[in-house]
Each structure stands twice: as structure tokens, then as C-alpha cells.
Image: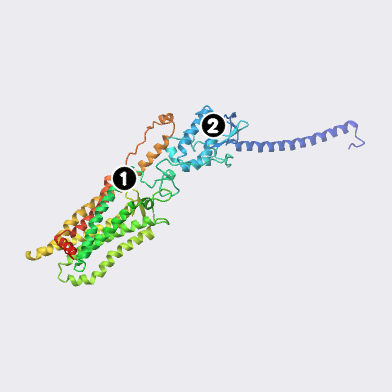
Amino acid sequence: RCRPVKTLVDCLGHSKKMDFHYSKIVWIVLIVAITKVTTDDIGEIFKTKDYIRFMKCVQMKTPDCLTVTLPYSMSSNGIVEKYYKTEDEIQTKLYELQASLQYIPQCWKVVQPLLCMIFRPQCLNDHVELPSQEMCRRIEEPCRIVFEDLMWPEFINCSNRDLFPQQNNQPHLPVDFDSSSFCLAPLVRTNDTRITIEGLEGCGFPCRNALFSESKHWETHQLIFWSAIFCVCFNLVATLTFLINWPAGTHSDRAIFYINCCFLASCIGWLLQFTGIREEIVCRPDNTLRIAEPTGDSSACIAVFVLIYFSLLAAIIWFGILIFIWFMRFDETAPKKYDIKSLWFHLVAWGIPASSTTLIIEFLDVIDANSMTGICFVGYRHFYLLHHFVFLPFFMVALAAAGYIIADSNWSIETPPKDKKSQRMPISKIIYLSLPVLLAVFVAFICHVWEGIKLPQYIEDFKSYIICSILNRMSEAIRSNLEMDSKCELKSSPDVVKLHLQILTHFFAGICMSLFIFEKRSLYLWRSFFRR
């Protein structure tokens, strides 16, 4: 307010100064506010610039991507325009990828959203949101064989930060993709990671061994059937021969009788598959191979395993006892010693197989099936287990037999010639019948070790064959660019002859053990039996 002493001009000048002062304050406040808003907007722009790309939007002819219809009609080919110029080229590439990727179940589940965000992204106001780095990393593990075999578009790489920026938000398409997938024959769908193929998780080996053809399966089954029938006939005649002369039988006769009984039971285990239950023995309900048994529905598999393994191990032990009995016949105090130890022989011959069988079934869970042999046994997946539970006991008995034979040689030197003939025949007979069995088992052991060493290579070659078959589902143009052969071949597979040698060893040993009764005395026994 102007004082009276002031002139009108002075009063007006003072008023203007006050207005200018207030105007400066207002302008400063406005500038600060605008600066604050602008800074926030710029920060937000830089924040979103990492995953937003400005691209020209175009109307899609058909809003389809892989297995879904997209909920938008505007898209852009700006991300892939360097490689695919038109919508038709984009769709063709997607169909080619789908033709192969749907046979890789775990990959197919996670890769569809990523492909659609790259090839058919939603475009709004000429801008496209890129997929995140995490979204790309999510497909690396399940789709690794795709990257390894050059079927994947080269520019879709998680190290490409222009395409896959590091960001906090997780972009997604508002659609539910059809994750239905398939397994390329002969593989089958399974969630059991123990039988899936590495890189093709969700697909596993079928019950029928894919490394062997149908004709090889048929040949092997025929070999088993006729070999087991012959072995049963020989063992049955041997057991009946000892039974009709049981009261007069010697201790060695009874040991041979038990050996033949064991091989007879073992052959029955091999023949069970020919009663129409082979599929139940070796296959699970989902058509995969039985491994790491027992499970709740594996009674047939376990029954076959017990019949074969328990009987085989018992036969091996009884064979060792037989040699021991024959050796003790040369000691004048042997009868008394044997009578004392007779019970212990039975405990050892039946107790060790029972303990070993129980250990395998109840604690180890290592019983596996094999469609070629049609049985369940130990050591099909873990080869060293067959060495521990079968070959090791046999070679221990063989070493013991060698020791007894050496001891018998010393006896032979010290015994007068007139006393040798009557006692020499049994030990010579066991040597003649044992050496072929030992040789056959040794050959089977070498074959088994060889196949165990080569098995990883067989599986790797089979995996390459399956991947080749999957990739060959792409177009001829793609295969030409990748220099792929139009025909896929299995480079290597197990030798069926080696498998047949291992199978025949079992039946050959059983037949050899039955030959102990092929002598004149047995003929007289049967003749007197029928005359009764």
C-alpha cells in the first residue's frame, strides 16, 4: 500500500516490483515441477526401451501360430525380416519347426510361446515387446539337442541381447498352447527318467528292444525255446534216473541229482515266457521295459527271476560240493567227515542262493527285463552286477575245483596203479564234463564284458538315429541346407551272435551236468525198473 508522502509514480513502480518478484517464484515452481515430471517420463522411457522395439504393424492374413489362434490381428515381421520377408515364409518356417519339435515333448511344452513372440508378436501402435532373457533360458535345457543339431534358427540365441534383453517383467501371450506331443517310433511316452533318452526327456525305450529287429527277436526266442526243451529233457531223464535208485545212491549221486533239479527249475523259468505271458514278464502297462524291479505289478517278472537265478546259483554251489565230495573219497577218513558235514552242505547250497536272491529283491532293486531273452534277470543295465552275482561265484568254484584236481594229482602219484582204476574214473569224468562248461562260461564272460563296454556307444548311435529321423521330418530344402542325408541308418547295434552264445552257455552247462548218468549202470537201473 502506498504511503501518502509518495507520489503516484513511486507507488506504481513499487507495485510492479512486487509482481515481478512473485512471478519469478511462480516460474521457478513450474520449472521444477515440469523437470520432475519430464525426468520421470524419460526414466520410464529408458526403462522400457530395453524390451520395446518400434516396428511397423501389419494386418495378419491368418492369426495362427503353431497350435493356437492368436487373440490379436496386428503383428510385425520386424524381428525376423532379415531372414523371412513375408508372412507365408514365416508360417512355413513355423510349420517346419513344429513338425520336428513336437517329437521332443519337454521342449515342445516351453518353446511355443517363445516362437510366437518372435515370429508372430503382438504389435500395438507400431511397437513390439520382445521376449525376456529368462524366457529364452527356460528352453535351453529341454531343447538342447535342437541347438546341437543345427535345426534351430541361428539368430534365436540366448546370448543375443538385442533379441532377448535382460528385464524385470515377464511378457507372455494370453493364450493356452496345446502341449500335446508325440514320441517318434519306436520310442514311447514315459515319465520314468531311468529309461528316457538324454535330450528326448518324455520319450523312452519301448518294451521291445529297439536295438534289435523283429526277426532277431524271433530267432532268439526260437533258440531259447528249443535249447530249453532239450535241456529239460536231459535234466528230467537224469533226475528220474537218480530217483529210481535213490536208496542205493551215493553222496555224489545226490549232488548230481540236485544239480540237475536246479537246471530243470531254471529251464522252466526260461520257458514260462512261451505260455503267453512274455509281455507281462518284460513289459510294464505303459509299454516300457521293466527295470529296477520289483514294483507292485511285477509278480511274473520276479517269479521268473527267482526260478532262474536261485536255481543257477544253487547249481553252481552244488557243483563245487560235488567236486569236494569226490576229492574226499580219496581220504580214508572221508566218510565220517562227510556225514558230519552233510547238513552244512545243504545249508550252504540252499542258504547262499536264498540270501543272495533276497538281497537283490528286497534291497538292491536291480532286476531288469530283456525282450530278447524274455526273462527278468540281474545285470542287464548294470553289467558289473552280473559279474558279482553270477560270474564271481562260478569262477570261485572253478578255482576250488582246480585246487582239488591238483590235490588229486598228488594222490595219483602216491597211489599204486592197481588202486587207481576204480577210483580214477569219477574224477576223470568230472574233468571231461567240466572243462567244456568252463570254456563256454569263459567265452560268455568275454562276450558279456565286450557288450558291456560297447553298450554306451550303441545307445548313443541309437539316439543319433532318432534325432536324424526327427530332423528328417523337416522340408527337403532345410535338409539340403544342413547337408543332411534323406535316409537315417543305425550305425551300430549289439551283436546277436554274442547274445546267443551267452544264452546257449546256460543250457549247454545243464546238458553237460545230465551226462553223468550216461553209463551202463544207468541202463541197468532203467531195465530193472521196467521189469518190476
Q: Quadrant of the C terminus?
A: bottom left
Q: Quadrant of residue 127?
A: top right
For label 1, the crowd category at 10 Å Cα-Cα, with few meaning under 14, some 14 to 19 and many 20 or more, is: few
Report how many numbered discs are placed on residues in the image. Answer: 2
Please report contact status of discs 2 and 1: CB closer than 8 Å, yes or no: no
Q: Which residue is mark 2?
A: 79
Q: Is residue 423 left or right of residue 99?
A: left
Q: Is residue 112 above or below residue 347?
A: above
Q: CA distance from mark 2 to mark 1?
A: 55 Å
The mark nearer the N terminus, 2 or 1, is 2
Q: Which residue is mark 1?
A: 218
Indicate the position of residue 171 as horizontal and vertical percent values.
Answer: 58, 40
Q: Is residue 157 above or below residue 305?
A: above
> Camera-side residue: 149 or 326?
326
Residue 319 visible in this rendered orientation of the protein: no
Q: Secondary structure at mark 2?
A: loop
Indicate the position of residue 453 as horizontal and vertical percent values.
Answer: 31, 47
Residue type (three-letter) at the residue carrying disc 1: Trp
Q: Is residue 179 left or right of residue 47?
A: left
Q: Is residue 38 above or below residue 290?
A: above
> Camera-side residue: 436 or 449?
436
Indicate the position of residue 500 as horizontal and vertical percent values.
Answer: 27, 48
Q: Quadrant of residue 260?
A: bottom left
Residue type (three-letter) at the residue carrying disc 2: Ile
